[in-house]
Image (tube, rainbow, N blue to C red):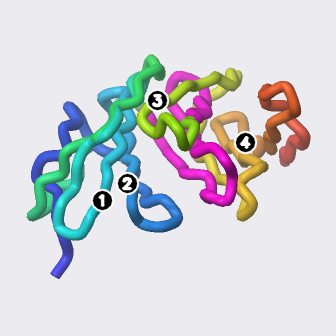
């Protein structure tokens, strides 16, 4: 039987829910302008972080999930969220928003609930974000009918390395 979340702690509709590579953490994005990160352990789920700055919807379930983190920073609803594969030293999450921004959230393994973010600004609404299999390239698609590929440089800044348009 499918599991259903009855209490996501989001204040609005959830748009996406994604498990990390190992299925230990769940990231949800919502019209309430937040991303919430849940620790998943057997039958229990605990909110560890809330990333603020998005809006979205909730998905009902039979289990109660408590976020371990809430990440905030978007000024409009969050359309998409994606974990980078965990072969990297840091944890990376990318979030796409109606506010024409992508936020790249990073957390060091020594401080797993301390998330920092940087912003990539665009001229149009952002629809989707997706990481390469190695986790070092981020694909971004939006309302301008372009797909851009981004890569972190040695200074920790993100550079657009390719633009694909019709």
Closer to the N terminus: mark 2 or mark 4?
2
From the image, tell me which residue sits under label 2.
26
Which secondary structure is most common in the magenta stretch?
A: strand
In this view, the mark in front (3 or 4) = 3
- Residue most extreme to the front: 110
Q: Is residue 129 magenta?
A: no
Q: CA distance from mark 1 to mark 4?
A: 36 Å
Closer to the N terminus: mark 3 or mark 2?
2
Nearest the eye: 72 or 80: 72
Task: Give the image quarter of residue 140.
Answer: top right
Position in image of residue 144 (x %, y %): 71, 34
Res 114 label: 3
Q: CA distance from mark 3 to mark 1?
A: 18 Å
Q: CA distance from mark 1 to mark 2?
A: 7 Å
Task: Give the image quarter of residue 69.
Answer: top left
Q: Is residue 80 magenta?
A: yes
Nearest the eye: 149 or 66: 66
- Helix, strand or loop status at disc 4: loop
- Helix, strand or loop status at disc 1: strand
């Amino acid at each position: 039987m499918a599991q259903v979340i009855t209490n996501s702690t989001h204040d609005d509709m959830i748009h996406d829910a994604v498990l990390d590579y190992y299925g230990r953490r769940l990231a949800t994005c919502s019209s309430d302008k937040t991303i919430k990160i849940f620790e998943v352990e057997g039958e229990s789920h605990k909110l560890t972080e809330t990333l603020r700055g998005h809006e979205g919807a909730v998905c009902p379930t039979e289990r109660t999930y408590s976020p371990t983190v809430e990440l905030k920073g978007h000024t409009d609803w969050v359309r998409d969220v994606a974990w980078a594969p965990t072969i990297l030293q840091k944890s990376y999450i990318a979030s796409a928003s109606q506010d024409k921004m992508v936020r790249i959230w990073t957390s060091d393994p020594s401080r797993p609930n301390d998330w920092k973010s940087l912003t990539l600004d665009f001229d149009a609404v952002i629809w989707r974000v997706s990481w390469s299999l190695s986790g070092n390239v981020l694909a971004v698609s939006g309302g301008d009918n372009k797909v851009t590929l981004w890569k972190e440089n040695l200074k920790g800044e993100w550079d657009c390395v390719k633009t694909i348009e019709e």
